[in-house]
Each structure stands twice: as structure tokens, then as C-alpha cells.
Image (spheres, rainbow, N blue to C red):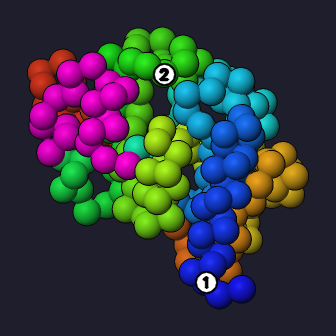
Amino acid sequence: MNKMNNFKSDINLCLETLNKGGLILYPTDTIWGIGCDATKSEAIKKIYELKNREEKKSLITLVSDENMIRNYVSNPPGILLKYISHAQKPTTIIFKDAINLPQRLISDDGSIAMRIPKDDFCIQLIKQLGKPLVSTSANISGEKFPQNFSEVSPVIKNGVDFIVQHRQHDNSENSPSSIIRLNEKGDIEIIR
């Protein structure tokens, strides 16, 4: 099968899995991630269980564009929307006042971490799903994140419902996104 057919096939199989509340292992614009439909609370619970992660530790969601941010964040600050659309490096932004998402995904303070990935596969998947996608590093909580597919542990591979074929043989060493938010003064603060 050629790369284009793999890409389309992977997208279709991801959609099928996500719509059933399943988990996927997929490449992002940063590192390989474990993902699910961000609107399905039970699927989010499965991610926490697979990663052996406390639910108090928030997960990142990927969205396709600024309009999708507006569907899940009440009055997102213009400065953050401008920043996210012009950032050269993959950047996750913590927005206050998450809406229309399961409580399990929202931090205790009401915030949500979101990123618009700079990756064709992720953008196509999110657009076709029509909803945000959870994206968390493909590792057990506390262990080193995988820099490429070959470093993903068998526990994670066996714990998901579908593994994307696209970019499995890319051995580039990748790292997580930057994370920013607005501080109390309204200035951009870099967290990671």
C-alpha cells in the first residue's frame, strides 16, 4: 500500500476507533501520543488507567483551528489566539474557562490545555472527527516519553485499540510542546 493510501486508511480506522470510545496510538507534531475523542469521558478514563496517571494531572487536547478553540473555551483571549496561530514551535496553551467538555478533562481550576498541531495527519483526523482529540505522551506516567515510535513500550502498544501505521519508521528524535498561559497580570508566561 502506498503512503497516501496508508494515510487515508489510518484516518478512517482512527475515526472508527475514536467514535466507539477507543484509544489510538498516533504521531503528532511533537511526540507519539495516546489519543481519544475529547468529548467521551469513559475514553478519557481509559487513558488515565493505561498511563497509570492521576486524574488530577491534566491532559492536552488538540484542535484543528481557532474556531474549534472557541467551541470549547469561553471567551479565549485574543492575545493567546494570535500567539497560537503564529507560533513556530509546537505550543500548547492553557486556557481558562473550558466549556462543552467532560469534567474529567478539565482541570480543577476550570482550565484546559489546547494546541493546534502543525501536522497534516493530526489536522485531517481532527477535522474529520469534528471534535478535539486528547493527546498525551505515549508512556506510563513518570517514565521517559518516547522520542519516536520505536521507543513506545509494549504496555502502551498493547493497551490501545488502534496503532497508526503512518510515520512508524520515522526515527527522528522529537520532544514535547512548549506550554504557555496568561499570568495574573495578563502577560504570557512560559511553563515548559
How far across and down, in percent of the image, does residue 114 sit?
39, 38
Quadrant housing the C terminus: top left
Q: Amino acid at mark 2?
A: Leu
Task: Provide the residue span drawn in magenta.
Answer: 64-82
Q: Are marks 2 and 1 in contact (CB under 8 Å)?
A: no
Residue indicated by mark 1: 3
How far across and down, in percent of the image, does residue 42 sit?
71, 24
Query: Residue placed at 12% from the left, 25% from the top?
Result: 186
Residue 69 in the figure: left or right of residue 170: left
Q: Secondary structure at mark 2?
A: loop
Residue 85 in the figure: left or right of residue 57: left
> Per the image, is 65 magenta?
yes
Q: Residue 92 is drawn in which quadrant?
A: top left
Residue 101: image tag: 2
In the image, residue 6 above or below residue 126 = below
How far across and down, in percent of the image, does residue 80 sit?
19, 38
Query: Residue placed at 12% from the left, 37% from the top?
Result: 79
Quadrant housing the N terminus: bottom right
Q: What is the distance, in whole Å, between disc 2 and disc 1 at their CAs?
A: 34 Å
> In the image shown, does 145 or 167 lie closer to the viewer?
167
> Per the image, is 59 magenta?
no
Dominant SS in magenta:
helix
How far across and down, in percent of the image, does residue 170 sit?
61, 79
Q: Secondary structure at mark 1?
A: helix
In the image, residue 174 above or below residue 129 = below
> In the image shown, does 1 or 146 lie closer to the viewer?
1
Q: Residue 149 is drawn in which quadrant?
A: bottom right
Q: Residue 2 is drawn in which quadrant?
A: bottom right
